[in-house]
Image (spheres, grey):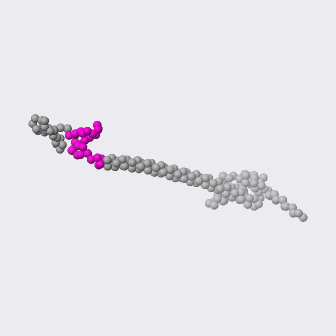
């Protein structure tokens, strides 16, 4: 019996009778465990274990780096969301403070106008002969009062004249405050 010959480069085995070679399966198996390939592949390249291990290690490292990058991206996204929320909260705080200041300014402006009207009525009391300036102030039509740019009333005298014509009971000499008694 002739020794078995096999051409690894062409994958041909000689025919027993003629000595000619025929095509065979290009992958051979060895005594390796089931599921593993032998040292020869379909292209004729030999299995390079160190290169395969290096490739596996490289892929594992890339996967690990990808997971690390994904975690860093998730952390950065969470931080950005927190900053945006804080900024939004800060904007809301500023908007609320602005609204409070506007309301406070409006209230102060109304109080200032009211005080200016009171001052105008009290200053006209003696000049116009108003007996009770508090009553005249209460009866004064506030919607008819006109104000200048500084917020001072401009037509209080005219309104008081019209009020005194409509309600003559308001005319009179104002009561003088009692003179204090001094210990004698």
Q: Residue at x 20, y 38 (%)?
A: 25
Residue 165 located within the stretch drawn in magenta? no
Residue 141, percent across and down?
A: 69, 52
Asked where in the image residue 31 lies, by quadrant, the reply is top left
Asked whether residue 9 appears in the rendered view, the answer is yes
At 54% from the left and 51% from the top, the residue drawn is 89
Q: Looking at the figure, which quarter contains the N terminus?
A: top left
In percent of width and height, residue 150 lies at 63, 61
Q: Nearer the viewer, residue 168 or 179?
A: 179
Does the stretch in magenta take in 48? Answer: yes
Instruction: Return the residue found at the far bottom.
Output: 184
Tell me where the magenta segment starts and ends, as one range: 26-52
Quarter-of-image position of residue 39: top left
Q: Quadrant of the C terminus?
A: bottom right
- Give the vertical position of 175 relative to 63 (above or below): below
Judge whether residue 146 can be spotted in this image. no
């Amino acid at each position: 019996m002739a020794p078995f010959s096999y051409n690894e480069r062409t994958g041909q085995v000689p025919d027993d009778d003629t000595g000619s070679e025929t095509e065979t399966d290009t992958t051979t198996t060895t005594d390796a465990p089931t599921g593993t390939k032998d040292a020869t592949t379909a292209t004729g390249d030999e299995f390079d274990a160190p290169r395969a291990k290096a490739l596996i290690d490289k892929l594992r490292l890339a996967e690990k780096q990808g997971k690390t990058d994904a975690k860093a991206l998730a952390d950065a996204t969470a931080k950005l969301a927190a900053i945006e929320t804080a900024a939004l909260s800060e904007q809301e705080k500023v908007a609320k403070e602005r609204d409070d200041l506007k309301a406070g300014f409006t209230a102060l402006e109304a109080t200032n106008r009211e005080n200016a009207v009171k001052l105008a009525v009290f200053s006209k009391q003696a000049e116009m002969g108003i007996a009770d300036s508090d009553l005249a102030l209460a009866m004064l039509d506030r919607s008819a009062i006109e104000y200048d740019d500084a917020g001072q009333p401009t037509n209080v005298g005219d309104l008081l004249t019209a009020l005194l014509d409509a309600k003559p009971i308001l005319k009179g000499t104002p009561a003088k405050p009692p003179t204090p008694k001094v210990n004698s």
